[in-house]
Image (cartoon, rainbow, N blue to C red):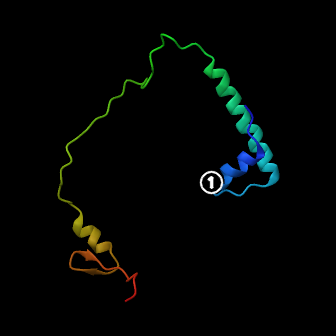
Amino acid sequence: MSITIAEVKKIAELARIELTPAEEKRHAETISAVLDYMKILNEVDTKGVEPTFQVTGLVNVFRKDEVEPCVITKEIIAQMPQTEGDELVVPEVFED
């Protein structure tokens, strides 16, 4: 399956990527090669092969999401350039 220069241009436009004519030609050839390889893989007989979702044996480890007090709050506040109480003061970003 080959991809045309026009299709590469459309993909580049959708991705908001500017390509030179040489890059368009190279990407058309590269994408076409990948699609040809996928076509070969689609011909492989996979009947009786169980889908593989995970091969490492690892499992998700979940912990309870609990709020814990911060033990370094005072040290963090001491590093802030300008504070008001226990809060950081930042310049305004919106004008009235």
Q: Position of residue 82 (x, y in %)?
A: 32, 81
Q: Position of residue 32 (x, y in %)?
A: 73, 35
Q: Is residue 91 above or below residue 75?
A: below
User: For this view, does 50 lie left or right of residue 78?
Assistant: right
Residue at image point 48% right, 13% down: 49
User: For this view, does 22 lie left or right of residue 65?
Assistant: right
Q: Is residue 17 above or below residue 41?
A: below
Q: Which residue is mark 1?
A: 14
Q: Viewer-proximal residue, 64 or 35?
A: 35
Quarter placement of the C terminus: bottom left
Quarter placement of the N terminus: top right
Q: State the image quarter where residue 62 is shown.
A: top left
Q: Is residue 44 above or below residue 95?
A: above
Direction right: furthest residue: 22
Q: State the image quarter where residue 53 is shown.
A: top left
Residue at image point 24% right, 63% down: 72
Q: Position of residue 28 (x, y in %)?
A: 75, 42
Amino acid type, callout 1: Leu
Element carrying mark 1: helix
Tell me the crowding category of disc 1: few under 14, some 14 to 19, or many 20 or more residues within 10 angstroms, Cα based.
few
Direction top: furthest residue: 48
Residue at image point 31% right, 80% down: 89
User: For this view, does 11 lie left or right of residue 6?
Assistant: left
Direction bottom: furthest residue: 96
Q: Position of residue 17 (x, y in %)?
A: 67, 56
Residue at image point 22% right, 69% down: 74
Q: Viewer-proximal residue, 82 or 65?
A: 65
